[in-house]
Image: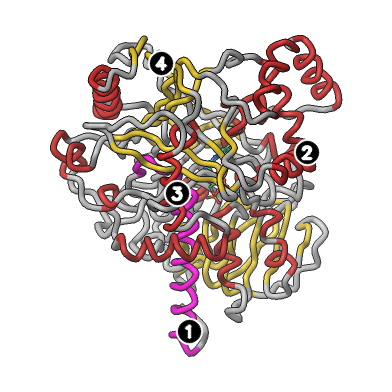
Amino acid sequence: MIHDLSTAQLPGEEYHVCIVGSGPAGAILASELLGSNLRVAVLESGLHKITPRGDALRETESSGLWVKPWSRERVLGGASTTWAGLSSPLDDADLAPRAHLGGIDWPLPSAELSELWEQAAERHRFPGSAHFGAEGFARLRRKGDFHPGWCELEEKVFLAPVEPQNFGTECRQVWESTETTLLLDATVTQLNWDQDLQRVGSVSAMDRKGNTHKIRARVFVLACGGIENPRLLLASPGPDGVALGNGHDQVGRCFMNHPKSYAGEIQFRNPIRSAPYFFGCIDGGFAGYAGLRLPTKRQADEGLMNSYVRLEPLFPWTDNPGIEALVTLVKQANGIMRLFRKSRADEVVELRDYSETGDDSEVQNTRRGFGGWLALLFTVLRHLPGVLHYLVYRLSRKPAPIRGARIRAFMEMEPRPENRVVLSDKLDLNGQRLPHISHNVSPLDRKSILAVYSALEREVQELDLGTLEGGLTDSDPWPINQDASHHMGTTRMGRDPASSVTDPTLLVRGSGNVYAAGASVFPTSGCANPTYTIAALSIRLARHLEAQFAESNENRP
Ligand SMILES: Cc1cc2nc3c(=O)[nH]c(=O)nc-3n(C[C@H](O)[C@H](O)[C@H](O)COP(=O)(O)OP(=O)(O)OC[C@H]3O[C@@H](n4cnc5c(N)ncnc54)[C@H](O)[C@@H]3O)c2cc1C
């Protein structure tokens, strides 16, 4: 059942589970709890659609790398309403203890995670292991005329459903079910510690009229994203007056992102006509590409992070603003996209412009009214020759000559306590302290991606592919500096209470009944996009909560 908090007649009941946030973490958890006989409430700050109020509540302060406003969405479905949908499993080495990170590891076996990814694929439209395997996307390596036999580098596949899951709409059945109470316009401002119960008894949620409501539950799950999860804990005093879960001053620390940007390009000796596996394509319902990273052993031997690069083909029309404007307009008209995909359903459809990936583009995430859309149309018309050139190759099956490839880098950041979320003194429109995020790349982060570039440069020479121009150097200003919208690590899970906020079951330490879901619990991030693993962990948390309630005669964990 869906309610608006400001008008809802709530019976004042105590829910079994109260989930804060309806992005992938919260939505998948709620979906997995359906049929469990548990009364579940989902409190979502946004509405069905984006609103100026929701946009204002995205505000942050940041120092170091800038956190962009469109890296998060205050709306039903959270950032899955705008995400690109790319997934890849973490590598085994990401989960195992890494000596150069002080032995930090993931407190769950990789086999368990593999099983959970498979379930995420079966039930929530993520790609499964078969898609990532040799007969899945990797079979496209044989297609086209670019088949480098790397000596030092290793390939890693990233895949997205052609229509990425929007968990706001994807989970409609869950929201409408009588077992779930979805409260929209419910911005949780605090978790309230109950001295008698010795656990959190309720949360305070504010509606757009400024009224505060208390929602009671036996268990609370924070699923508000990697910035809001620690923000809420920091704003909520626990039994001793210290913020919940912050007994060891760990809440908000070890913030990680996947800083990304361009540096350098390869000019090919001979133009390439087709390389769908490396340059990106749609195949069998998934869009994907292969990135390049250093093998695990090399990373371990040299004490490096797991960063990677992607080769982005350069066409004669690349960087034409008219093309991105056209792509943005066409994406609005979902019908046209579907028609195009349907007409090419049995083919491998190769990327013809990077804007087609929608990868975090500012243009594609700008809010615009009628005037804005008109301006896009004018941009298309102003750059018409380039747009037409693109369209000829986009709509025909003619291979486009690719003379070069831009190198797009994605960095893994080491988890460092000084990269952190704290509460600012500035207030948001609800009178709550804004989150302040400080994060920057470390010398080790830089050294790791520089090692990938050095390896790529040697490969380009030795395989006589052409020349690598304007590569990456260890100098300032550091160019790989864009927020990837992957906010991780701020309530990290671990076995050691002194260095983690959540235990291996994702219970916030010292809270008794508050769990965290989402990438805030990642101890390290690898180079994979986080949501696949967020989904896996939400499935695992659902099974844990069900077991906990089942164990107790009184239905109490
Ligand atoms: C443009 C873009 C492209 C991306 N591309 C990819 C990609 O290709 N692959 C990938 O894996 N990831 C991608 N991401 C990241 C991905 O969207 C996130 O990892 C994912 O959405 C995180 O899920 P979540 O549920 O933890 O948080 P969110 O999606 O951020 O959802 C949090 C929810 O909590 C709500 N909320 C916040 N605070 C409160 C509060 N106080 N009270 C009540 N509700 C609250 C929000 O309104 C929101 O609905 C992308 C993100 C963006 C923005």
Q: Name which residue lies at 45% across and 79% down.
A: 547
Q: Name which residue lies at 39% across and 45% down.
A: 489
- Report the span colored magenta: 525-553
User: Mark 4, residues whose alpha carbon is within 10 Å: few (<14), some, or many (≥20)?
Assistant: few
- Checking the image for residue 550, the label placed there is 1
User: Mark 3, residues whose alpha carbon is within 10 Å: few (<14), some, or many (≥20)?
Assistant: many
Quadrant in the rendering for residue 8 = bottom right
- 3D distance between C-alphas at marks 3 and 1: 27 Å
Q: Nearer the viewer, residue 294 or 314?
A: 314
Residue that mark 3 sits on: 519
Q: Nearer the viewer, residue 119 or 5?
A: 119
- 3D distance between C-alphas at marks 1 and 2: 49 Å
Image depth: mark 1 or mark 2 in front? 2
Residue 148 visible somewhere in the drawing: yes
Residue 415 in the image: x percent, y percent? 31, 39
Residue that mark 2 sits on: 336
Residue that mark 4 sits on: 270
| Residue at the left extreme of this rendering | 301
